[in-house]
Amino acid sequence: MLLQIPDLLSADEVREARAMLAAADWQDGRATAGHIAARVKSNLQLPLDHPVASELGERILDRLWRTPLFIAAALPLRVLPPRFNRYGGGGAYGNHVDNAIFPIPGTAQRIRTDISTTLFLNDPDDYDGGELVIEGPFGTRSVKLPAGSAVIYPGNSLHRVEPVTRGVRLASFFWTQSLVRDEARRQILFDLDCAIQQLAADHPDHRSIDDFTNTYHNLLRQWSET
């Protein structure tokens, strides 16, 4: 599944986030890349323990847990604290696949990266290039969204960030471990959820709503991992 989530952050929230990021100290993004990915990565990244990353990350997580579209599509069990990157001056990130497992900082827990998310913090007119290009069962998609909007896509997707030839591209990125590991099953549940919501909106007293809702929860009960 590749799904856009519009207006995850408001315009005011984006402006405040950019101001905080502008005053932050960045490091070479290769410091957090594996030995293969480091060869194709050219960007800047906030250190994982940077106070700005922590504060903005908490705000994003709070908003995520209050966003029905994200909950319905991702069925999140755990979300890795958001990270932040900056591309400019030709910076890019060549084709790569994200790590399957990440440690959760400050804990003994680990997270399986079922779903990747990129939250754009600049409007497309602010920079040239910088498209997120994702390859998957849906084909090859090029994504460049308005500031405050996000895209989620399978964590096992081959993807890249095209060179930024003008301006600066700021984004947050993070991974989610879903209650439902299998992508095809998550898609079935999401489609069923959307159909139930549409039926309830069009025909709120339809007797099938309870039946479909029961089926949804029985499938989730059968397929989920906790």
Image (cartoon, rainbow, N blue to C red):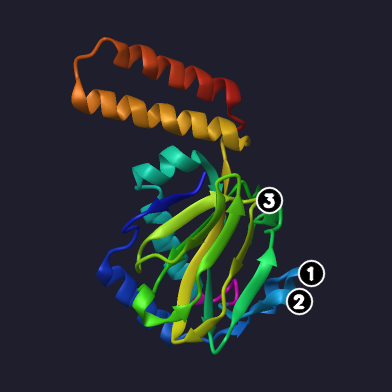
Q: Residue at x 62, y 35 (%)?
A: 182
Is mark 1 in CB contact (under 8 Å) with mark 3?
no
Q: Amino acid at mark 1?
A: Ile
Residue 69 visible at all: yes
Q: Amino acid at mark 2?
A: Arg
Q: Quadrant of the C terminus?
A: top right
Q: Amino acid at mark 3?
A: Arg
Q: Which residue is mark 2?
A: 39
Q: Residues within 10 Å of mark 3 (few under 14, many from 20)?
A: some
Above or below residue 137? Residue 45 is below
Residue mark closest to the camera, 3 vs 2: 2
Q: Residues within 10 Å of mark 2 (few under 14, many from 20)?
A: few
Q: Residue at x 28, y 64 (%)?
A: 10
Nearest to the observer: residue 152 or residue 110: 152
Residue 152: image x %, image y %? 49, 52
Above or below residue 143? Residue 66 is above
Residue 208 image-quadrant placement: top left
Q: Residue at x 30, y 29 (%)?
A: 197
Above or below residue 18? Residue 83 is above
The alpha-carbon separation of the residues under discs 1 and 2 comes to 6 Å
Is mark 1 in CB contact (under 8 Å) with mark 2?
yes
Q: Which residue is mark 1?
A: 36
Residue 191 image-quadrant placement: top left
Q: Which residue is mark 3?
A: 110
Residue 112: image x %, image y %? 66, 47
Quick one: SS at disc 1?
loop
- The range drawn in magenta is 47-51
Residue mark closest to the camera, 1 vs 3: 1
Q: Residues within 10 Å of mark 1 (few under 14, many from 20)?
A: few
Quick one: SS at disc 2?
helix
The alpha-carbon separation of the residues under discs 3 and 2 comes to 25 Å
Sequence-wise, the earlier of marks 1 and 3 is: 1
